[in-house]
Amino acid sequence: MKTKLLVALASLTLTGASILPVTNVLADSSPQVINVGLDFKQAAQTALNEAKSGKLVQLELENDRSRPVYEVTILDGTTEKEYKIDANSGKILKSSHEDISDDLEDIQLSQTTPGLSLVEAGAKAKEQHNTAQLREIELETENGRLVYKVKMSENNHTHKLVIDANNGSLISDKTK
């Protein structure tokens, strides 16, 4: 009896462990539109006001336990500041600071000055897909070039754009 119970518990644990990551991936990558009261620009400004200084390098809209939230990352010298903001009220739900002095890529990003801000990159992406919802914008270095990677959702499709962070030109635009 004990052996059967242990086997049943072990199989439930294993099944649960294998289901959870798949569920999270599906929820995060869903092309469904999320209803929000705050747009990307307002979420960015909220985080920048709270951070007092630094460079906005990532902004993402996602559902967190059925609640729409923006996750915002700001680099400031050797500090990474992250904020979770309620996408309806604009309230900062969580903030954290992390030392990135050993992360060369993040330090380099914090020292760059792109010709286009993250918010301006979002506006450029909206010019390409004006009815799509911005889901994520991230500043990155790709093949030695400073770019914004943008994800947008529209009609159960995901648009992935790459925009030159210096001149705002569209490098690629793919739809899945």
Image (cartoon, rainbow, N blue to C red):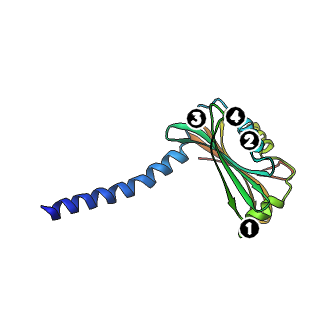
Which residue is identified by label 2? Answer: 44
Amino acid type indicated by mark 1: Ser
Name the mark nearer the viewer: 1 or 3.
1
- Please tell me which of labels 3 and 4 falls first in the chain: 3
Between 145 and 113, the one lying in front of the other is: 113
Q: Secondary structure at mark 4?
A: loop
Q: Secondary structure at mark 1?
A: loop
- Image coordinates of residue 34 in percent, x first then y, are 58, 35
In the image, what residue occupies the spot 44% across and 49% down?
23
In the image, what residue occupies the spot 74% across and 59% down?
79
Name the mark nearer the viewer: 1 or 4.
1
Q: CA distance from mark 1 to mark 3?
A: 35 Å
Q: CA distance from mark 3 to mark 2?
A: 17 Å
In the image, what residue occupies the spot 27% across and 61% down?
10
Q: Residues within 10 Å of mark 1 (few under 14, many from 20)?
A: few
Name the mark nearer the viewer: 2 or 1.
1
Which residue is identified by label 3? Answer: 34
- Image coordinates of residue 78 in percent, x first then y, are 76, 62
Q: Residue 101, labelled with which disc?
A: 1
Image position of 88 (left or right of 4): right
Q: CA distance from mark 2 to mark 1?
A: 24 Å
Amino acid type indicated by mark 4: Asp
Which residue is identified by label 4? Answer: 39
Between 127 and 58, the one lying in front of the other is: 58
Residue contact between numbered discs 2 and 4, judged by CB atoms under 8 Å? no
Q: Residue 6, labelled with which disc?
A: none
- Please tell me which of labels 1 and 4 falls first in the chain: 4
Q: Residues within 10 Å of mark 3 (few under 14, many from 20)?
A: some
